[in-house]
Amino acid sequence: MADHASERPQQSGAAPILVASNRGPVSFRTEDDGSLTLRRGGGGLVSGLSAIDDPNAVWVCAALSDADRTAARQAPDGRLDLAGHDVGGQAVRMLDIDPEAFARAYNGVANSTLWFVHHLLYQTPVQPAFDAGFRTEWAAYRAYNAAFAEALAAEAAPGAAVLVQDYHLSLAPALLRALRPDLRIGHFSHTPWAPPEYYRLLPDDVAAAVLEGILGADRAAFLTRRWALAFADCCEAVLGAEVDRSALTVTHGGRTTRLGVHGLGADAEFLRERAHRPDVDERLAALREAVGERRTIVRVDRTELSKNIVRGLLAYRHLLRTRPEWLGNVVHIAFAYPSRTDLAEYRDYTAAVQRVAEEINTEFGTADWQPLILHVNDDFPRSLAAYRLADVALVNPIRDGMNLVAKEVPVVSDHGCALVLSREAGAYAELADDAITVNPYDVIATADALAEALAMPPAERTERTKRLAAAATALPPQQWFLDQLHAL
């Protein structure tokens, strides 16, 4: 994992288009007999990349597990397709990065530092404290980004287009440009971007390195204009860069980087088809039985600190305490799927969600009414069933790059659904007109919004849902991906 990038001979591969992301389109599992089985992933990036019909395109990703590392080691240069794996029509190069270095880069910097900064999650009286341990993690993060830059440089054809994804790889564009100045490089941030005064919690050299890393791209793109402008503000405040906010450009160190905005939408065709398969119908029947004729408030999240699940539960409790007409007449279906369980903060947060849920059921539950149904085990078909059933969808993150749940629920809702939406979700930029907006920190106002949503006349709910679904699907994943490619 040492950074030998500068010593490498300049070579070029055959790929005219490359994508780089921490998580790739496939993962592996070791079976009892020692053999490897491959699992194809889902998500916006996977369906977006399927828009490329070039067999020479290459996706560069990291090995995330021991089984992934075994597969990567057994393949020539980590090229899974050349080792005979069915990786879905594209070539995939999986990087076998030392597990300890990977953990430092991924948990120490990407998820415990950059994620916390961009989502404004630090308890600043005690965090962060950038000490010697952080410097070890930062060195690993630099080496991790250098490994990606080297692999991309080796695979890219002359003048190729490279799309680098997210905060895990914020240094990679500049490192890659140093190796291959002929390439057209784009970077896409799937997170929000912190305002300068918060961003400057980072050590000065780190704050500058992350910005300069992304500015190594020809184009840096974001989910909303708000996040793009926050990035520009940081470049101006930290680097003294020249910013043109109307043209959306940042000029620094003799180079100009264009900023782009691509609001990733829901994949309507996939969702509608998937939401009516037998496994979803089966789970829908089970939920209907549990709910009866009552109204439903649905939330589906990863148990992620930024998703604000605890305040959502407190708002529901306030609704039940202050509006007796809903006692026995509403059920809150909350799916909070485990996330980043290797970080203590996340384990504690999941425990807090479970504790508040239990308190609500203890305070209000009766022999024939369970006011809250909480599930913490991941089940995609059950999520789709809940989407179909929802009278109200609660999406109240503290801060979110986009939040696709806000876009997915209106698309698959059976009878129309009122959306209660945080103004701090990226999706707010597109959905605000037909949602009921909340300040995510205001528990009482969120309870009021839930009451308003529950009381919304069916005809209005149906009309709003149609408009929400249209806005939510305006830029489906394949188009979102191609737009970035064409803009390069």
Image (spheres, grey):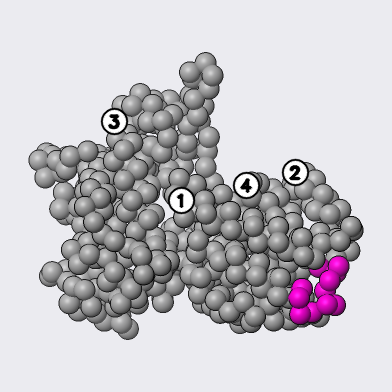
The residue located at (27%, 65%) in the rendering is 202
| Residue numbers of the magenta segment | 320-330
- Between circles 2 and 3, the one closer to the viewer is 2
Residue depicted at 76% across the width and 76% down the height: 321
Three-letter code, disc 2: Asp
Instruction: Give the residue at x 16% y 43%.
Output: 3
Mark 4 vs 3, N-terminal side: 3
What residue sits right under mark 3 in the picture?
77
Q: Nearer the viewer, residue 130 or 55?
A: 130
Q: Nearer the viewer, mark 3 or mark 1?
A: 1
User: Residue 191's x, y, as percent?
Assistant: 42, 63
Residue 379 is a magenta residue: no
Q: Dot 4 lies on which element?
A: loop
Q: What residue type is disc 1 on? A: Ala
- For label 1, the residue is 344
Q: Helix, strand or loop at disc 1?
A: helix
Q: Residues within 10 Å of mark 3 (few under 14, many from 20)?
A: some
Quarter of the picture containing the N terminus is top left
Quadrant position of residue 367? bottom right
Q: Which amino acid type is marked by label 3?
A: Asp
Q: Helix, strand, or loop for circle 2?
A: helix
Instruction: Report whether 292 appears left or right of 1.
Output: right
Distance from disc 2 to disc 1, alpha carbons, whole Å, reads 34 Å
Q: Is residue 450 above or below residue 486?
A: below
Looking at the image, residue 199 sits to the left or right of residue 28; the answer is: left
Q: Quadrant of the C terminus?
A: bottom left
Q: Which residue is mark 4?
A: 378
Judge left or right: residue 115 versus residue 232. Answer: right
